[in-house]
């Protein structure tokens, strides 16, 4: 007899601030669509893929399993990165990093300005996300260009800061001027959560 294993069910958390809290940098309309429709879609997609995998294991039929596994990485990465993105911003943001993370950025990139210039280049080129990650293999911070939600990932990396540059993230507010949106992100970026994630990564991996 095949035992039905417990399946994780993922849920969408509310935004950590009001929908209009990041105006004028990101509009209430964009945050509403982005969180309630797009992010919710990735949560739903992840849950559906887990159901398919569990059903197939139970039935011993794996014809749709490879597609479902792809849906787990696509939708799962979408859920994880959106969670991070919301937490990386706040109405009180707009400052530069402090403490251990600031020191490590200066150490690994030369300066905050060098890191920021490289991150902005990643954000201008990505077909999905610009990420600052802690690479546990090389023991250093790095910027990463991500297409969709999962293409371009470096194994063993722990995301620290995430910027969504999908068109749904900015087109309604900025049209094709993605650079203006990237500048706006730095007006609301909040380094508290990234700093905590950096401390956590170093504790886990160093
Ligand atoms: Fe998004």
Image (spheres, helix red, strand yellow):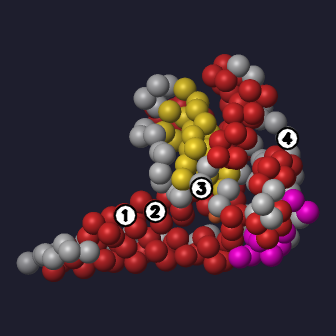
Sequence-wise, the earlier of marks 3 and 2 is 2
Name the spot of residue 34 as percent of width and height, x first.
69, 71
- Main SS category, magenta section: helix
Part of the protein shown in magenta: 24-33
Q: Residue sitting at 48 percent across and 54 percent down? A: 150
Which residue is tagged 1?
70
Q: Mark 4: which secondary structure?
A: loop
Q: Mark 4, mark 1: which one is toward the viewer? A: 1
Which residue is tagged 3?
128
Label 1: few (<14), some (14–19) or many (≥20) C-alpha neighbours in 10 Å: some
Which residue is tagged 2?
74
**For the residues marked 4 and 1, what is the alpha-carbon distance in whole angstroms?**
37 Å
Q: Relative to residue 140, is residue 114 drawn left or right?
A: right
Which residue is tagged 4?
95
Q: Mark 2: which secondary structure?
A: helix
Q: Mark 3: which secondary structure?
A: strand
């Amino acid at each position: 007899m095949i035992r039905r294993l417990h399946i994780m069910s993922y849920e969408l958390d509310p935004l950590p601030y009001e929908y209009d809290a990041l105006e004028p940098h990101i509009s209430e309309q964009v945050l509403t669509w982005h969180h309630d429709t797009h992010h919710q879609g990735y949560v739903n997609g992840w849950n559906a893929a887990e159901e398919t995998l569990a059903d197939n294991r139970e039935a011993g039929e794996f014809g749709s399993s490879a597609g479902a596994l792809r849906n787990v990485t696509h939708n799962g990465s979408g859920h994880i990165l959106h969670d991070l993105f919301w937490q990386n911003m706040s109405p009180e943001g707009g400052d530069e990093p402090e403490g251990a993370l600031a020191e490590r950025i200066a150490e690994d990139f030369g300066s905050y300005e060098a890191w920021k210039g490289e991150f902005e280049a990643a954000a201008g080129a990505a077909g999905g996300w610009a990420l600052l990650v802690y690479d546990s293999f090389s023991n250093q911070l790095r910027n990463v260009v991500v297409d969709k939600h999962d293409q371009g990932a470096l194994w063993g990396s722990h995301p620290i800061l995430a910027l969504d540059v999908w068109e749904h993230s900015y087109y309604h507010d900025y049209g094709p001027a993605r650079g203006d949106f990237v500048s706006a992100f730095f007006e609301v970026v909040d380094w508290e959560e990234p700093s905590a994630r950096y401390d956590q990564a170093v504790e886990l991996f160093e």
